[in-house]
Amino acid sequence: MTDGRNRKPAIQTRTAQALHFVEDETGAVIPAIQPTATYARDHNYSTRKPYWYRRDGSQTTQQAESIIAELEGAGDTLLFSSGMSACTAVIESLAAGAHVVAPEVMYHGVRQQLLAYEERGLLALSTYTAGNLDELAAAVRPGETALLWVETPNNPNWEVTDIAAASKIARAAGARLITDCTATPPSMTRALEHGADISFHSATKFLNGHSDVTAGALSVRQADAGFEKIAEIRKLQGTVLQSFDAWLLIRGMRTLFLRVERASQNALAIARHFEGHEHLEAVLYPGLASDPGHEVANRQTDGQFGAMLSLIVKGSEQTAIDVARFCEVFYPATSLGGVESLIEHRKTVSGEGFPVHERLLRLSIGIEDADDLIHDLEQALSRAAR
Ligand SMILES: *Cc1c(COP(=O)(O)O)cnc(C)c1O
């Protein structure tokens, strides 16, 4: 073992202490917010490293990036002003006409963006059923596919895709694998270690955890020319994360492990309670032993299953909308990953043309008392069924 001095603290400890942050000058244990947009040059008119202008990155943003890199086991991490701007930078970095493979059902914003690029002839898109590795393998074209997109578990059905298996398929075809594991943050899923080339997270969600920041993170094992290009796009588009938001994110991440563990426990309790419920057709949650993705999820999410689940309500589309509006503890709101529980009728939010069950309610479970949440859903379900 170790003598105690050389022992490297666990990632839980490193995260809680923002990588054991101590400010050199003052000894403060919390980083200051550095809001400057520009940096003075020295007497030789040279920039003092590493910054010269905000769009290139800033001190506070880089502190947040270091914490995410540590969580991901990444060599390099870039933070963006939102998850969507991070995803857009990846899409934008592809050569014109590149072949992209993505799930048929995925986060609606990313899907919309892929379709918009396809419509303008900027990429060729093939899709597969999320979680179906045979379809995924058939959609990938060896020597031609540039990017394989995997979202796991995917929005809003929470189907699980085996990242390691997808990575083998991507590698054999010479494609890069990007994973969107926003629903299972890196306290649970370290996608790069499972073989992803780029790990994406909407940091708006669990990483920040308090519904008061939009941010997106891209991480790689080692920055290469492709990642440099993405960094260049961030600079030219000005989609870098702002300092105050980076500071809030640093604060939010200190409690990541605690929040996500509690929210996952709540989600499991809710899923188990409502499985087979008289007013429900299905509970979609990889934590249930009956779920087709359970085994892979167990391996990929470190024994937790995350805090996202969906309910397919019996009755009509209006019954599902009624359940969401009759809730008194859950907030009827979109987004996910905050400490407060949210419920939404997904079809209303994702809009026409998005393949989603019309009676599906998406639940983002927070850290409240599980019985309060169960009781709230029970009363809303029975009121809506009347
Ligand atoms: C929210 C989300 C995004 C987009 O991130 P924003 O921060 O809202 O721009 C992408 N993928 C998934 C799975 C998400 O939940």
Image (tube, rainbow, N blue to C red):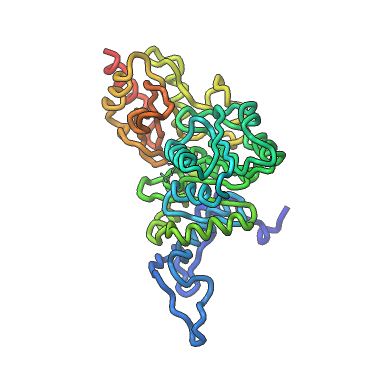
Please give the count of numbered marks on the rendered protein: 0
Q: Is residue 259 visible?
A: no
- Horizontally, residue 157 falls left or right of residue 316, namely right
Quadrant in the picture for residue 273:
top left
- Horizontally, residue 36 falls left or right of residue 140, namely left
Q: Who's the residue at 37% across and 14% down the image?
A: 314
Q: Is residue 336 above or below residue 88?
A: above
Point out residue 111 in the picture as x, y percentages from the top left corner: 46, 37
Which is more toward the observer, 141 or 273? 141
Q: Is residue 384 visible?
A: yes
Q: Who's the residue at 55% across and 39% down the image?
A: 124
Which is more toward the observer, 26 or 188? 188
Quadrant of the image where one finds ligand 1: top left
Q: Who's the residue at 42% across and 20% down the image?
A: 274
Point out residue 371 in the picture as x, y percentages from the top left corner: 37, 27
Point out residue 193 in the picture as x, y percentages from the top left corner: 65, 44
Quadrant in the picture for residue 381:
top left
Q: Is residue 63 above or below residue 181?
A: below
